[in-house]
Amino acid sequence: MIFVASAVFAPATSGAYALALRLGAPLEVRIGKNSATLAAGDYLYCGSAHGSGGLRARLARHMRPHKRAHWHIDQLAAVANMLGAFVEEQGDECALNAALGALSIPLPIPVAGFGSSDCRRCAAHLRFWPEGAALPSDWENARKAAHLSLEGGGRAA
């Protein structure tokens, strides 16, 4: 597991990621025929990349400010501040999501079905990340390693 602040530092291989986003104001989102309001705050969205360009290409798309909306996450990504992404080569998005739900205080699911309309295992692939909430230890270690790398002028990876 690594944390990248920019898609350029992500590997161009298949895998899974958890996009970290900060929403500055409430946002109305649509999931099929349903709508809901996301509260301002931090979110983690678990996804996967198996196509051409792998994780680097998928994260570059998510982190690009202007794009045609295709996935649920595009609604949030269009207005949120991108904090970076936790990346796991050859990882599984549902396993990343399950790790967040298995915490001693699980990160809450703000909108059922968000990002998981094609998933039979997960209620949603978007989780609210409350201020001060712990992350799984390998995630926290990756975030700290990237932060230290950035402070030293190096790349986040």
Image (cartoon, rainbow, N blue to C red):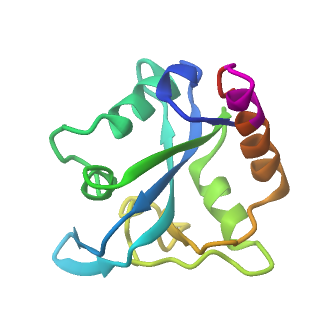
In this orientation, which residue lies closer to the viewer: 149 or 51? 149
Q: Residue at x 27, y 55 (%)?
A: 79
**Picture coordinates of residue 87, whole percent (x, y):** 63, 38
Name the residue: 16% across, 76% down. 33
Looking at the image, residue 157 lies above or below residue 133: above
Depicted 31 relative to depicted 71: above or below: below
Instruction: Residue 108: give x, y in percent of width and height.
Output: 57, 79
Is 53 on the left or on the right of 106, as rendered?
left
Q: Quadrant of the N terminus?
A: top right
Front in this rendered view, residue 92 or 61: 61
Residue 84 lies left or right of residue 146; in this view the side is left
Percent position (x, y) of residue 21?
46, 55
Magenta-span inclusion, residue 16: no
* Residue 104 appears left or right of 82: right
Q: Which segment is the magenta one?
A: 148-154
Q: Is residue 80 visible?
A: yes
Count of numbered marks: 0
- Name the residue located 75 percent from the left edge and 50 percent from the top edge: 139
- Which quadrant does the C terminus fall into? top right
Res 106 quadrant in image: bottom right
Residue 53 location, x and y as percent? 44, 18
Q: Is residue 99 above or below residue 47?
A: below
Q: Is residue 1 visible?
A: no
Q: Residue at x 78, y 44 (%)?
A: 144
